[in-house]
Amino acid sequence: MKRIVLAALATALLQAAWGADASTAPGSPAERPPDRANLSKVRSLKIILKVEGKELTATLIDGRTSRDFIALLPLALTMNDLFGREKFGHLPRALSEEGQRTHTYEVGDIGYWSPGGDVAIYYRQDGQKIPDPGIIVLGKIDAGVEALDVPGSVKVTVEPVSK
């Protein structure tokens, strides 16, 4: 009986701490990024990206990998072009790999590619799958992703939105 009460108490504490059900708590095997279309319905984090004199905002999914990314900010990255569909930049350290992996992307997605320790922003759809092991989607550019649709590399600064 004591074990059942303790388990119920632990579940309630996790639910209160993470605002949903305990299965989405960081470190839980069930931690998954929510459906991209429902970003506005989950607790989210905002960042600003400065690209070629333009400011873009992005909404990150509240998960362990995204929080690891936020902990690196501010960042100045040289983002190189790959396949005419994405800009990618190497991060100073690896991020958590606890988020759900996907082999697809949408224009505007910000993804973490763990084998290279890179962050990628997808600016054009080419219909190709992301190779194994896939990416962990961190979030999505709110508007203006076309600022990345330029030849070659770009300098990008990433900062948290100050409250």
Image (cartoon, rainbow, N blue to C red):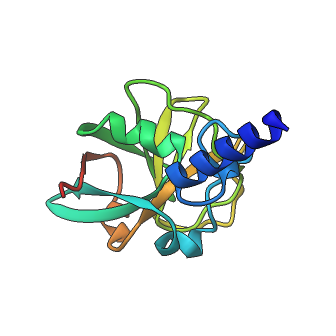
Residue 76 left/right relative to 130: left
Residue 159 left/right relative to 110: left
108 and 127: which one is in front? 108
137 and 157: which one is in front? 137
Determine if residue 83 is in view: no
> Where's the C terminus, which quadrant?
bottom left
List the single residue furthest toward the top: 93
Instruction: Identify the residue at image location x=68%, y=59%.
Output: 104
List the single residue furthest toward the right: 1
Looking at the image, residue 89 lies above or below residue 45? above
Instruction: Identify the residue at image location x=63%, y=68%.
Output: 35
Instruction: Identify the residue at image location x=63%, y=51%.
Output: 12
Looking at the image, residue 160 lies above or below residue 55? above
Determine if residue 48 is in view: yes
Percent position of residue 84, x then y: 49, 57
Percent position of residue 65, x then y: 52, 40
Q: Quadrant of residue 126?
A: bottom right
Looking at the image, residue 90 lies above or below residue 110? above
Residue 42 left/right relative to 126: left
146 and 9: which one is in front? 9
List the single residue furthest toward the front: 1
Percent position of residue 31, x then y: 67, 48
> Where's the N terminus, which quadrant?
top right
Q: Quadrant of residue 80?
A: top left
Percent position of residue 139, x then y: 48, 58
Q: Quadrant of residue 114?
A: top right
